[in-house]
Image (spheres, rainbow, N blue to C red):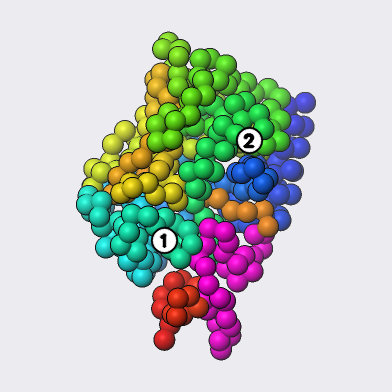
Amino acid sequence: MKKFLLSALVFVASTFAAHAVEGALPGRFTINAEGDTVHFSKGNLYYKSGSLGGFSFFSDQQYKTPEDGSNSGSSQYRSLFGFGTSGWKNSGANAYDPMSTSTDNADYLIGGSAENGLTGDYAYADWGIYNAIQNGGNIAGLWRTLSMDEWVYILSKRENAQQLFTMGRVKWTDDWDHTEYTCNGLILLPDNWVKPEGVIVLLITKYGWELDYTPGDILYHNSNLDLNTYTLNTYTLEQWELMEAAGAVFLPAAGYRKGSEVMSVGTDGCYISSTPHGNGVCSLEFTSGNSSLETPWYSRAYGYSVRLVTRPENEGQGIDEVGIQPSAVSGQKVLRNGMLLIERNGKTYNAQGAEVK
């Protein structure tokens, strides 16, 4: 029976994959009261510099934590990003490069103003709008970053929201060096979640976590001081494959970066949103032990994990068909000499955001 269920889930996942944007996970998540839905990418965003580099989703396993190059002394790759560091040179920010490590918050002010986020006229500052993700369809405009309101809606406002997330860990053995690894993280369950047979899913909201939303502070607080959130659910590789095929998303506790120092890997998860707040940025944060799920306003200069999403209607499309809306560049699309261009505020840009004369 277990083998039949695994085969059925794999068939559903493969059927979805045949019709979806490359790199998208099968689960759908409602993000607002209008009923719009998204699919999460299969892994956190990863960047490698150089002529053969670029943006990709790290690995095909969401439970693997990409290492940020700062801790190893490498200047070639990055997995924790400052706000708006998509590489768009015309963003108006001093720190626009993905490899930026400036600790000056003012360097990350897009358009020179604290009011600008990763939408509207400044949507090219969003990693997924501006860049072609190599293993995510390889066309600019297929992906974007969730707003803070959308993160909050997924976790607290969609139907049965309090039964559709938890925390846990995945354990696996590396095929190469036979070392056993453990990855802690936040687990998101899709709108139409059906628990796979043979897998136990314990919800943290059944063990003392209570909704207590205060913007910029707490989303859920934990009244059970004896609860270690990551050990509540421990999955083998086989069990997690069943979970993922059923639509579950795993957000690794990949830590955060301040300048060139990476901290709290394995204990804290800090996921960026497209929403600014004052001189800071809104983010989603979860921690180990008996802590809480928070939506703090932190410095734009900190390096955060980025988990992009795509809309179901993006299947098989690129920046020209998607129309980059609503989290995208406002302006008029024109076709010139076979090239798609965007006219905005009296200037013309190509699909990568570079100004065209």
Disc 2, disc 1: CB below 8 Å?
Answer: no
- The structure residue drawn at horizontal position 45% and vertical position 12%, both measured from the top left corner, is 224
- Amino acid carrying mark 2 in the image: Arg
- Residue 56, numbered circle: none
- Amino acid carrying mark 1 in the image: Ala
Q: Is residue 74 above or below residue 298?
A: below
Q: Quadrant of residue 290?
A: top left
Verify whether residue 142 appears in magenta.
no
- The structure residue drawn at horizontal position 30% and vertical position 45%, both measured from the top left corner, is 299
Q: Nearer the viewer, residue 33 or 65?
A: 33
- Residue 158, numbered circle: 2
Q: Nearer the viewer, residue 7 or 38?
A: 38
| Magenta highlight range | 314-342
Q: Nearer the viewer, residue 85 or 44?
A: 85
Verify whether residue 330 appears in magenta.
yes
- The structure residue drawn at horizontal position 30% and vertical position 49%, both measured from the top left corner, is 279
Q: CA distance from mark 2 to mark 1?
A: 28 Å
Position of the C terminus, as image quadrant, is bottom left
Total marks shown come to 2
Is 77 left, or right, of 182 in this rendering? left
Q: Which residue reaches farthest top? A: 226
Q: Nearer the viewer, residue 22 or 351?
A: 351
- The structure residue drawn at horizontal position 25% and vertical position 51%, both measured from the top left corner, is 105
Position of the N terminus, as image quadrant, is top right
Label 1 crowd (10 A; few <14 / some 14-19 / many >=20): many
Residue 47 in sight in this render: no
Is 223 left, or right, of 314 in this rendering? left
Query: Residue 285's spot in the image, x, y percent?
Result: 41, 34
**Which comes sooner in the sequence, label 2 or label 1?**
1
- Judging by the rendered image, the residue that carries numbered circle 1 is 125
